Image (spheres, rainbow, N blue to C red):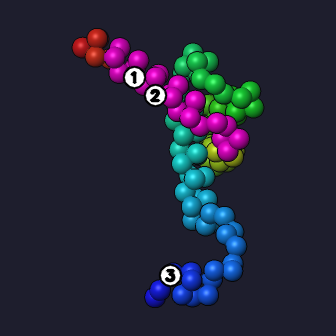
């Protein structure tokens, strides 16, 4: 099957944005990042550039014990993460990880 838009007569169709699959992959990656955030200690979270609503959602997720409620909260965190600039957050998390790894090596 030929996917060339010009040969299939698609050249006049406008781009409708990312596919549903790519949007779902993006949502899952944001949710995974949110899960990593819920595993951090409060003093580590204080070092990250997090909006107040996201920080509150992370703190709430730490309190939850029921699997279904925790799953919904993680999805909510993923939704909030859509509005967060990821580069500074990922850089700050990488810095925390580097410091943690360096500290662990010194303790050996």
Q: Is residue 27 visible?
A: yes
Residue 50 pos. (x, y %) = 66, 27
Residue 94 shows which numbered tag? Answer: 2
Q: Secondary structure at mark 2?
A: helix
Residue 8 pos. (x, y %) = 57, 88
For the record, the magenta segment spans: 81-103
Quadrant of the drawing holding the C terminus: top left
Q: Which residue is mark 3?
A: 3
Label 3 environment density (alpha carbons within 10 Å; few <14, some 14–19, many ≥20): few
Residue at the left extreme, as displayed: 108
C-alpha span from label 3 to label 1: 44 Å
Residue 19 pos. (x, y %) = 61, 67
Tell which tag, 3 or 2, sits nearer the viewer: 3
Q: Are marks 1 and 2 in contact (CB under 8 Å)?
A: yes
Residue at the top extreme, as displayed: 106
Q: Are marks 3 and 2 in contact (CB under 8 Å)?
A: no
Query: Is residue 101 shown in magenta?
Result: yes
- Which of the pair 83/31 is nearer the observer? 83
Q: Which residue is mark 1?
A: 98
C-alpha span from label 3 to label 2: 40 Å
Q: Earlier in the sequence, mark 3 or mark 2?
A: 3
Q: Which residue occupies 70% across, 73% down?
A: 14
In which image quadrant can residue 41 be found? Answer: top right
Q: Which residue occupies 47% across, 22% down?
A: 96
Q: Earlier in the sequence, mark 3 or mark 1?
A: 3
Position of 86 relative to 6 (above/below) = above
């Amino acid at each position: 099957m030929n996917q060339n838009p010009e040969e299939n007569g698609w050249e006049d169709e406008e781009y409708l944005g990312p596919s549903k699959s790519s949007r779902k992959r993006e949502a899952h990656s944001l949710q995974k990042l949110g899960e990593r955030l819920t595993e951090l200690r409060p003093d580590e979270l204080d070092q990250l550039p997090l909006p107040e609503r996201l920080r509150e959602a992370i703190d709430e997720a730490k309190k939850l014990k029921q699997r279904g409620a925790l799953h919904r909260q993680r999805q909510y965190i993923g939704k909030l993460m859509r509005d967060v600039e990821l580069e500074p957050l990922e850089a700050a998390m990488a810095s925390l990880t580097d410091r943690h790894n360096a500290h662990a090596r010194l303790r050996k």
